[in-house]
Image: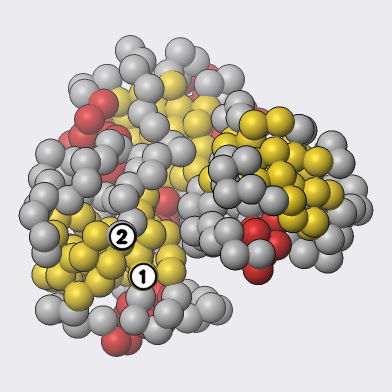
């Protein structure tokens, strides 16, 4: 974790604040568009937020937080209690939503889903179009900033959802990036052949019944039994092999582990790369896994 000082809090929409976190011990870790960080809050909660500032500025990170009245305490604390000058710890940036080279881009953002898209649009060059939707103009963070900077390359929909089928016909060759409400992401995945998505909530899916399995700890030694009613993450932590974690929903990547042998059952929404798994939600198909822990 890196120490930062909360330098500035700015309201950027009706229920959204932007936070600028300045490095307290020299330059912050480098990042690329699409990355996010874990923010450790003083109320003992850790939450994940996309970086929406300038990757070239190593002196500070910028994030944006929407107030959610049904939150588990993260956004409420940020909006009601955080003030400039507070020391906050953040993780090194992680990126499961990287911008790949392409001749043309179409970015689709809904509400707070604009946060990872904003630095992507700036990095993508002139052959990029942003379609940005929200409940109303006053609830859309950075809308005025985007309109001023990019002009007609930005299409704002402040009442209603854009016609994604029409956009698929208009941009048949574009690399598509989408972040927003689940219904918007689902529709984009169904319509566009080359689409990259990021979700803030896990997809509702049905898996088979949880069954027990064993984990061999290749680095620390020993074997741990993971019962059917306990996650791999909890079993490792209870056995004295602490694993970092953040969301516990398979969307942030904090608890990534290397799989040396055995077949994991992936239940995450990130798309675990070969030889990796996320301990908070994923389990095992094989009766035994060998992990680099």
Camera-side residue of 201 and 132? 201
In this rendering, does residue 224 appear at all? yes
Name the residue beneath numbered marker 1: 40
> How busy is the neighbourhood of tag 1: few (under 14 within 10 Å), some, or many (20 plus)?
some
In the image, residue 114 lies at what x, y percent?
36, 49
In the image, residue 37 lies at what x, y percent?
35, 54
Q: Does residue 41 lie above or below 274 as drawn? A: below
Marks 1 and 2: in contact by CB < 8 Å? yes
Q: Is residue 232 left or right of residue 77?
A: right
> How busy is the neighbourhood of tag 2: few (under 14 within 10 Å), some, or many (20 plus)?
few
Q: Tell me which label, 2 or 1, sits earlier in the chain.
A: 2
Camera-side residue of 44 and 217? 217
- Element type at mark 1: strand
Distance from Cα at disc 2 to Cα at disc 1: 9 Å
- Element type at mark 2: loop
- Taking the spot 31% from the left edge, 60% from the top edge, the residue there is 1
Camera-side residue of 147 and 38? 38
- Taking the spot 74% from the left edge, 40% from the top edge, the residue there is 289
- Taking the spot 38% from the left edge, 44% from the top edge, the residue there is 94
Q: Quadrant of residue 239?
A: bottom right
Q: Is residue 191 left or right of residue 128?
A: right
- Taking the spot 43% from the left edge, 37% from the top edge, the residue there is 97
Label at residue 1: 2
Q: Does residue 115 lie above or below 84 as drawn? A: above
């Amino acid at each position: 974790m890196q120490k930062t000082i909360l330098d500035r809090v700015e309201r950027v929409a009706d229920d959204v604040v932007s936070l600028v976190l300045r490095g307290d011990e020299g330059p912050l870790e480098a990042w690329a568009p699409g990355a996010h960080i874990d923010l450790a809050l003083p109320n003992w909660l850790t939450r994940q937020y996309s970086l929406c500032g300038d990757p070239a500025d190593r002196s500070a990170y910028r994030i944006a937080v929407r107030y959610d009245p049904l939150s588990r305490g993260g956004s409420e604390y940020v909006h009601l209690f955080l003030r400039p000058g507070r020391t906050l710890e953040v993780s090194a940036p992680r990126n499961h939503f990287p911008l790949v080279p392409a001749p043309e881009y179409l970015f689709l953002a809904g509400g707070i889903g604009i946060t990872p898209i904003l630095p992507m649009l700036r990095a993508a060059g002139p052959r990029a179009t942003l379609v940005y939707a929200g409940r109303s103009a006053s609830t859309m963070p950075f809308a005025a900033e985007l309109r001023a900077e990019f002009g007609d390359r930005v299409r704002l929909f402040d009442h209603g959802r854009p016609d994604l089928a029409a956009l698929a016909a208009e941009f048949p060759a574009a690399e598509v990036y989408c972040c927003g409400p689940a219904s918007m992401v689902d529709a984009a995945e169904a319509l566009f052949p080359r689409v990259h998505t990021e979700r803030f909530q896990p997809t509702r899916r049905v898996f088979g019944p949880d069954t027990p399995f064993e984990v061999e700890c290749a680095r620390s030694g020993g074997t741990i039994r993971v019962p059917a009613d306990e996650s791999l993450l909890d079993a490792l932590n209870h056995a004295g092999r602490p694993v970092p974690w953040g969301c516990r929903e398979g969307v942030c990547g904090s608890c990534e582990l290397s799989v040396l042998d055995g077949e994991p059952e992936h239940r995450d929404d990130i798309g675990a790369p070969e030889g990796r798994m996320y301990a908070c939600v994923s389990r095992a198909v094989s009766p035994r896994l060998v992990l680099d822990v």
